Amino acid sequence: MTAGRKIKVLVVDDSATVRETLTALFSEDSDLTVLGAAADPYGAARLIAREVPDVIVLDIEMPRMDSLTFLRKLMEQRPVPVVICSSLVEEGAETWWQALEAGAVEVILKPRLDTRQFLFDAKVQIGDAVKAAAQARLRFRSTEKKLSADAVLPPPRPSAALARTTETVVCVGASTGGTEAVRILLEALPADAPGLAIVQHMPEGFTAAFARRLNASCAITVREARSGDPILRGQALIAPGNHHLLVQRNGARYAVAVREGPLVARHRPSVDVLFRSAVRAAGANAVGVLMTGMGDDGARGLLEMRAAGAYTVAEDESSCVVFGMPREAIRLGAACTVVPLERLAAALLKGGLR
């Protein structure tokens, strides 16, 4: 994006009320301008042919063409950052996941009732998502998948009985673009990696499915966290949506606590909360990793971890979908090292061996 240029937004939603409301809200934002509004993907395609928007705000439940199909075709032919704003994804994590896999940068859940009031109440959240999406790095996507032996035989999994405890606890935070980044990070870890506690900004009810998908593809065990779960070598615990995740000391071991509480840095779960709890429970025996995401959640917490002697890592701009949270951490001097996504696993393991 050129400095000072307004972000051009295309609204695609079959509801005239939603189109009118979003158009009005975006028009009030000095950083945004509405390129147009369409009632279905065909109308959107005609508008895109005339002028390509910087960001598309897209509903899932659409007439004439399935929006996921439209999204996949868009990412294959002419990638444009897309923010999903839909009530359909509220009905199941699978649709939410498919939207992200198809290339959506962010997903915002809207209720089926009182939608107009919700859009007004969520004005800042939606505007922030659009602005972050405009900075996102996109790649052409192909629907063809390269298969491995996993398509015939599932990979062997380590036995839970062999898991060992460790005095190193790894805390990971991610937001926009993080579902894919976290997958890449965890799939690169060996079965005996240090135990991890992870905050990925995600709606309530969706983190269990996220954990199951990761568990099926990783050498380590991955699942949604429950209060009292021990942090074990070879296991990653994902913060449940709408709940904070904290690290606590349990004798000579570490465990997690799942808590309610206010939004911190506009989020629940908050990365700052996780990182601060690691400072209190583990101090220099912790490793902090801050990945792609908009905003600044986790930046101050990572700084607190470094001040306590922990090894801290920030994802490099070159691999971030949105270079917001890591950039703020780097600006504060919170990162011991800054590396691209493909080197995060090695940096994490190095930190755990200190």
Image (spheres, rainbow, N blue to C red):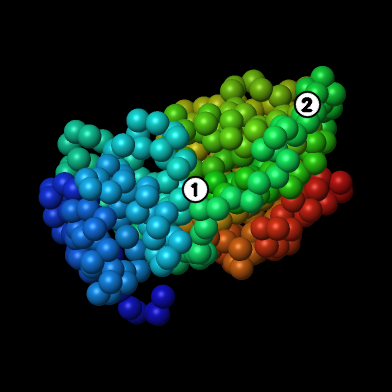
Q: Is residue 246 above or below residue 170?
A: above
Q: Is residue 331 above or below residue 346?
A: below
Specify whether 247 is left or right of 113: right
Res 224 → quadrant: top right
Q: Tell me, for residue 253, which label it has, or none.
A: 2
Q: Secondary structure at mark 2?
A: strand
Q: Is residue 263 above or below residue 38?
A: above
Task: Tell me the crowding category of disc 2: few under 14, some 14 to 19, or many 20 or more residues within 10 angstroms, Cα based.
Answer: some
* Image point (70%, 35%), residue name: 152
Q: Nearer the viewer, residue 51 or 235?
A: 51
In the picture, the quarter occupied by the N terminus is: bottom left
Check contact, mark 2 vs mark 1: CB within 8 A: no
Measuring from the top left, give residue 328's x and y in whole percent: 55, 62
The amino acid type found where label 1 is placed reads: Glu
Measuring from the top left, give residue 289's x and y in whole percent: 67, 50
Q: Tell me, for residue 101, which label it has, or none.
A: 1
Task: Mark 2 or mark 1: name the one nearer the start of the chain.
Answer: 1
* Image point (23%, 66%), residue name: 46
Q: Tell me, for residue 124, which label it has, or none.
A: none
Q: Secondary structure at mark 1?
A: helix
* Image point (78%, 31%), residue name: 156
Q: Is residue 293 visible?
A: yes
Measuring from the top left, give residue 4's x and y in whole percent: 34, 79
How many dots with numbers? 2
Specify whether 284 is left or right of 24: right
The amino acid type found where label 2 is placed reads: Arg
Q: Nearer the viewer, residue 68 or 331?
A: 68
In 3D space, how far apart are the residues under numbered discs 2 and 1 (Cα atoms)? 36 Å
Front of the two marks 2 and 1:
1
Measuring from the top left, give residue 250's x and y in whole percent: 73, 23
